[in-house]
C-alpha cells in the first residue's frame, strides 16, 4: 500500500520494469495486501465499510463477481464486529488468517476467500501477526497476555484446539515461517 495526498491505496510495483500500477482508487484507506498462492487474487484491509474489514480483489484490479452478490473491483468478505486486520493468505489458498480486535480482546481467526467458514481460533488481551506454516495447517502468532506482559510466540492449528507456546529466550514478536528445508 502507498499513501498519497492523505489516502492509502494498493499498488503493484514491478521491480524489473520499474513500473507501478494502482489497483484501488477508493477514498477509503486500503492497506495490508496479501497475494493468493497462485498470484491471481489479493486480500487487503479497507475501512470503506465503516471500519477495517477484509476485501478481496483480482490481481489486475478488474471487476469480478462478489461472493455475496454483485460485481465490483473489490469484494468485502468479513462482516463481523470489530476491526479485521493483518490478512495472510494460506499457502494452499483455502484460508485467509486475520487479526480481529473486538473491544478489549484480540483474536486470530480464519475465513475462506469467499467469506464463508469464519472461525475464531484464539482470544487474548492481544493476539496479532499471524503467519502460516508451509503446509497451511498451523498459524504462528504473537501474544501479549496483558498490558506490559511482553509478547510471546504461540502456534494454533486450524482446529483451534492445539494452542502451544513456542519457547524463546526472551520476549518475541512478528513470527515468520521459513521454507521447508530439503
Image (cartoon, rainbow, N blue to C red):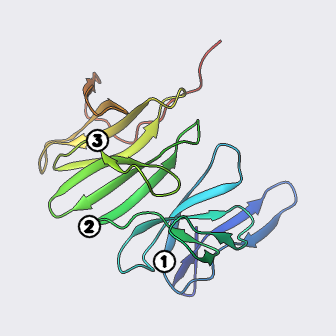
Asked whether the residues under the numbered discs 3 and 1 touch, taking CB atoms below 8 Å apart as contact, a structural biologist would say no
N-terminal of the two: label 3 or label 2? 2
**Please, what secondary structure does the residue beneath circle 2 have?**
loop
**Please, what secondary structure does the residue beneath circle 1 have?**
loop
The quarter holding residue 152 reads top left
Q: Depth check: 166 or 101 in front? A: 101
Q: Which residue in the structure is indicated by mark 2?
A: 81
- Which residue is rendered at x = 16% and y = 50% of the image? 125
Tell which tag, 3 or 1, sits nearer the viewer. 3
- Spot the residue most to the front: 69
- Spot the residue most to the right: 17
The quarter holding residue 175 reads top left
**Please, what secondary structure does the residue beneath circle 3 have?**
loop
Asked whether the residues under the numbered discs 2 and 1 touch, taking CB atoms below 8 Å apart as contact, a structural biologist would say no
State the quadrant of the C terminus.
Answer: top right
Instruction: Tell me if 162 is positioned left or right of 104 in this view.
Output: right
Task: Using the image, determine if residue 8 lies above or below residue 14.
Answer: below
In percent of width and height, residue 31 lies at 51, 67
In percent of width and height, residue 145 lies at 15, 42
N-terminal of the two: label 3 or label 1? 1
N-terminal of the two: label 2 or label 1? 1
Q: How many numbered badges does the structure rendering display?
A: 3
Q: Depth check: 26 or 160 in front? A: 160
- Which residue is rendered at x = 32% and y = 32% of the image? 159
Q: Which residue in the structure is indicated by mark 1?
A: 29
* Distance (Cα) linking label 3 and label 2: 16 Å
Q: Which residue in the structure is indicated by mark 3?
A: 121
The quarter holding residue 174 reads top left
For label 1, count other residues whose C-alpha is less than 10 Å away and answer few (under 14), some (14-19) or many (20+): many
State the quadrant of the N terminus.
Answer: bottom right
Q: Depth check: 4 or 121 in front? A: 121
Amino acid at each position: 500500500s502507498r499513501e498519497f495526498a492523505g489516502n492509502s491505496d494498493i499498488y503493484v510495483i514491478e521491480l524489473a520494469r520499474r513500473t507501478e500500477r494502482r489497483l484501488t482508487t477508493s477514498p477509503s484507506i486500503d492497506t495490508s495486501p496479501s497475494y493468493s498462492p497462485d498470484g491471481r487474487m489479493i486480500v487487503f484491509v479497507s475501512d470503506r465499510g465503516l471500519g477495517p474489514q477484509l476485501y478481496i480483489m483480482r490481481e489486475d484490479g478488474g471487476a469480478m463477481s462478489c461472493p455475496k452478490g454483485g460485481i465490483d473491483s473489490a469484494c468485502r468478505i468479513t462482516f463481523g464486529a470489530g476491526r479485521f486486520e493483518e490478512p495472510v493468505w494460506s499457502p494452499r489458498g483455502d484460508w485467509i488468517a486475520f487479526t480481529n480486535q473486538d473491544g478489549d480482546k484480540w483474536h486470530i481467526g480464519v475465513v475462506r476467500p469467499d467469506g464463508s467458514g469464519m472461525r475464531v481460533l484464539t482470544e487474548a488481551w492481544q493476539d496479532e501477526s499471524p503467519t502460516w506454516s508451509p503446509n497451511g495447517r498451523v498459524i504462528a502468532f504473537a501474544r501479549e497476555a496483558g498490558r506490559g506482559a511482553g509478547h510471546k510466540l504461540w502456534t494454533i492449528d486450524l482446529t483451534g484446539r492445539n494452542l502451544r507456546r513456542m519457547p524463546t529466550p526472551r520476549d518475541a514478536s512478528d513470527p515468520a515461517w521459513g521454507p521447508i528445508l530439503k
